Amino acid sequence: MREDLDFTPSHRFVKRTCITQGISFKLMKMKPRHAANFALLGWYLMIAPHHGGILKPFDFNAPLSKWEKSESYASKADCEQARSTRISERQDKSDEINSRKTKRILQHAIDGLQHGQCISADDPRLKGSP
């Protein structure tokens, strides 16, 4: 394997994850499969699942293993800050929009984010039941 890697899709994921974790991918001297395991340490912004369409209700009682990983972050503080920022951005957009349908869609997204959780990547609840 070449030292500089050719970034197939799996390598791109590892590179992006390493960047979000503050890890210099080019300086890493390990195989991509090992880098992927290392890069998974961090925090995920988890959003409850909703089935059947964009405005269908969220299932806040679903097990955490069924929730969607929205983004990954290097720390819980980064995750909480990003969640707060995303909520504020959507609230600002909602205030500027005249369309009731668009406002409902934005409010639905805000609701999902307000109930979103920042969860450590090594939290056993993400794996579900054995």
Image: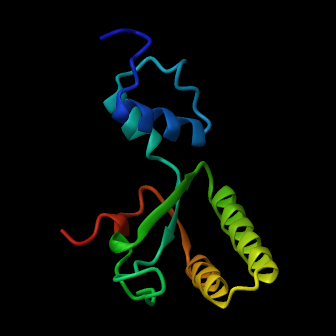
Work out whether 56 lies above or below 44: below
Give the camera-side residue of 92 and 15. Answer: 92
| Residue 74 in the figure: left or right of residue 65 | right
Seen from the viewer's position, the closer of residues 124 and 46 is: 46
Decide: is 60 above or below 31.
Answer: below
Query: In the image shown, does 124 or 63 lie closer to the viewer?
Result: 63
Q: Is residue 21 visible?
A: no
Left or right position of 27 against 76: left
Residue found at the far front of this picture: 99
Residue shown at 38% from the left, 37% from the top: 36
Q: Position of residue 13 (x, y in %)?
A: 43, 38
- Numbered-mark total: 0
Question: Which residue is at 40% across, 72% downward?
Answer: 67
Residue 90, image x, y percentages = 71, 74
Percent of width and height locating residue 91: 75, 79
Vertical order, 102 against 45 (above or below): below
Looking at the picture, how far across and down is residue 1, in whole percent? 29, 11
- Which residue does the image show at 59% across and 42% down from the upper left? 20
Above or below, 44 against 114 in this view is above
Q: Which of the 4 quarters of the picture holds residue 83?
A: bottom right
Residue 42 visible in this rendered orientation of the protein: yes
Residue at x-position 38% and y-position 74%: 64
Q: Quadrant of residue 4?
A: top left
Q: Quadrant of the C terminus?
A: bottom left
Colour setup of the view: rainbow
Residue at the outermost top position: 2
Say whether residue 11 is left or right of residue 105.
left
